[in-house]
Amino acid sequence: MALGALDNPMALLKPSASCLVGVIASSTALARAVCSRRPPDLFELRLDALRRFLDQVETAMSKLHAPLILTARHPREGGLGQLRSGQREALLRRFLEHATLVDLELRSVRQMKVLMDEIRRRQIGLIISHHDLRDTPSRDELRRLTNSAAAHQPAIIKIASRTDTPDQLERLVSFFAETNRSDFPIAAMGIGSLGLESRCLLDRLGSALTYVSLGEANVPGQATLGQLRRARRAYIK
């Protein structure tokens, strides 16, 4: 049975490794997740992408054998369907009782303050995220974003950015290396040509979460669950 809210969502995080998050963003991925004999540490339900299959999602809830992250992504950060804030909030509320963690973008927290209060009341973990699909910001800008996210007392801060060039990858990795000792666990990952390299490297460095596909990649550079598990054999004992 899918796990709901935990008294301490951070208890999910392993002391020596990132948690693997299998992204469910299609009916095909949902079917694979239900049939998985060796599921990842968590599943992420991308409710903006699953909005046409919500009855299937409801049916599958009791068959997903890993804790759930709920996400209804903002359109400016890769969300599908051009959904307004109220529509995304309704999607999250529909499945909130099943959530262990909820991912809200930093840009969404003002509009969803009432929902954030309910998330805390239910003792559900909060991920505050920022997704830059065009570039990796400067290290100063990444620090600013992280500080802004930290002000909301999240369980995890997530940064995903474009990594098509070595310079972009270096900025993201350097930022993570200097920030990962902060008060909040950091999940960092790249998107693009060097996305796979970034995810393997940041997973090895201790990113709190590493997102993987359950088949076809959801974004460029996303590893499959099998690829990440094979990569880990070289550095996790």
Image: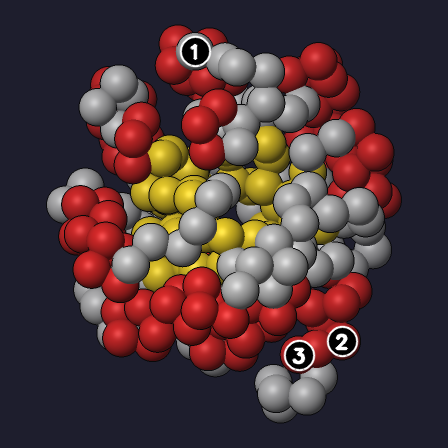
Judge whether residue 8 can be spotted in this image.
Answer: no
| Left or right of residue 158, residue 120 in this image | left
Disc 3, disc 2: CB below 8 Å?
yes
Q: Of discs 1 and 3, which sits in the foreground?
A: 1
Which x, y percent locates residue 156? Answer: 34, 53
Residue 146 in picture, x, y percent from top left: 24, 53
**Left or right: 235 with respect to 169?**
right
- Measured as percent of width and height from the top left, residue 187 is found at 42, 59
Q: Nearer the viewer, mark 1 or mark 2?
A: 1
What is the total number of numbered labels drawn onto the structure image? Answer: 3
Using the numbered discs, state the Cα–Cα distance from disc 1 to disc 3 in whole angstroms: 39 Å
Nearer-the-camera pick, 225 or 43: 225
> Which residue is under mark 1?
84
| Residues at discs 1 and 3 in contact (Cβ within 8 Å) | no
Amino acid type shown at disc 1: Arg
Q: Residue 6: x and y, percent?
A: 41, 46
Seen in the picture, residue 51 relative to 101 is either above or below; the reply is above
Q: Quadrant of the N terminus?
A: top right
Q: Residue at x 44, y 50 (%)?
A: 135
Classed neighbour count for the residue bearing mark 1: other residues with Cα under 10 Å, few (<14), some (14–19), many (≥20): few
Q: Is residue 161 above or below residue 231?
A: above
Disc 3 target residue: 232
Tell me if label 1 and label 2 are in contact, CB under 8 Å. no
